[in-house]
Image (spheres, grey):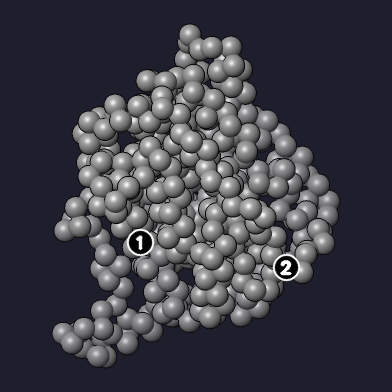
Amino acid sequence: MQVLQVSWQALSGFQSPKNLQLRSPSPKPRFRVSAVALPPPPMSPDIEEVFKSLESWATQSIIPLLKPVEESWQPQDLLPSPTYNNVEEEFFDQIRSIQDRAAEIPDEYFVVLVGDMITEEALPTYQTIMNSIDAIKDKTGVCSSPWARWTRAWSAEENRHGDLLRTYLYLTGRVDMTMVERTIQHLIGAGMDARFNNNPYLFYVYTSFQERATFVSHGNTARLAKNNGNPLLARICGTIAADEKRHEIAYVKVTEKLLEVDPNNAMLAIEEMMRRKITMPAFLMYDGCDPMLFHHFSAVAQRLGVYTTDDYANILEFLIGQWKLEKMEGLKPEAQRAQDYVCGLAPRIRRLQERADERARKMGPLSVKFSWVFNKEVLL
């Protein structure tokens, strides 16, 4: 679940990323911590019954989207092998080749790649969140329900993403791994403000969007790597993107099924998540230095075209079409209003971003130092 990613401009009220630099940064990371940890609200019996009734469907339609371990790629498949059978000279030649090609890639690309990797490495948080939702959680740790089996196997597939990117970045010598590792520790410790409120409908809407966003983001990093003459890195990012696409298909299918069996509540859940503007999984990232790290990272991703507000709007339009939201009929008045809001949102997002971009052009370029690339300044 990546980096990535939904619209970072959406998170900050559709402000230009460049405007973010003008805020007065607080001396400490702006983590939203409640004074009292409240338990999640009890789940509606109706919702629990919906997911119970869909177990057979999920077993037939969702579980097959997972790949058997024996058919899955592993990080070592894409990296130099230090095994005894690999001639020592050949192994070090392969590492030198990685470093030589990485030397030609600009620092801002590594900022985005590190941000993507750190998001992937916060996987314990994501599995914890999935197991906090009563209707789909793994109640025993080895529960046989399709929802629990998906959670465990999805986590296992996602676990390879951070491992692969982290090892590649380590081999390049282009990033400060100590600062990267500190950021990972901060992020896992900070958690994620998911606000699913024990409602699996909200969760599946979120993951439908999020997995599509990470597919787009990793696909764009693959494209940039290829343009920079780095076929190995392009293959790494493309391989991860393919996983994210498969996961996207699963979550989109679940939401589509919810729209079929409970259209009013499913439509209201889509509206609620889109009004929140979908908080990114790594929103609370912090390296111990920059309290605005997430905003700065996302501004670089926007400038490079790795993940942009236009991508956010495109994903929304894609899901509207995939779920046939504009064609839904017979909804209750409240759900009809939700339908109108969601189906009209993408053009509004684009208009707001155009205004923000115009303000940013008048302000001129801004830059910030990133600890991940040895405190070099990177243009926002």
Q: Residue at x 40, y 40 (%)?
A: 134
Instruction: Report the disc number at residue 285.
Output: none
Image height of 271 relative to 330, above or below: below
Q: Is residue 172 left or right of residue 285?
A: left
Q: In the picture, residue 20 is in which quadrant?
A: bottom right
Q: Nearer the viewer, residue 354 or 58?
A: 58
Q: Please tell me which residue lies in front, 28 or 247.
A: 28
Q: Earlier in the sequence, mark 1 or mark 2?
A: 2
Residue 100 quadrant? bottom left
Question: Label 1: few (<14), some or many (≥20) within 10 Å?
Answer: some
Crowding near pointer 2: few (<14 within 10 Å), some, many (20+)?
few
The correct choice, above or below, for 330 with respect to 362 in the image is: above
| Residue 26 image point, x, y percent | 78, 64
Which residue: 71% across, 53% down? 17
Viewer-nearest of labels 1 and 2?
A: 2
Q: Nearer the viewer, residue 202 or 42?
A: 42
Above or below, comparing residue 8 to residue 354 in the picture: below
Callout 2 amino acid: Lys
Asked whether the viewer can see residue 304, the reply is no
Element on which disc 1 rests: helix
Q: CA distance from mark 1 to mark 2?
A: 30 Å
> Mark 2 = which residue?
28
Do tag 1 and tag 2 residues touch (Cβ < 8 Å)? no
Q: Quadrant of the C terminus?
A: bottom right
Residue hosting label 1: 159
Which element is circle 2 on?
Answer: loop
Query: What's under tag 1, amino acid-wise?
Result: Asn
Percent position of residue 69, x then y: 20, 57
For image coordinates 38% across by 31% down, the residue present is: 48
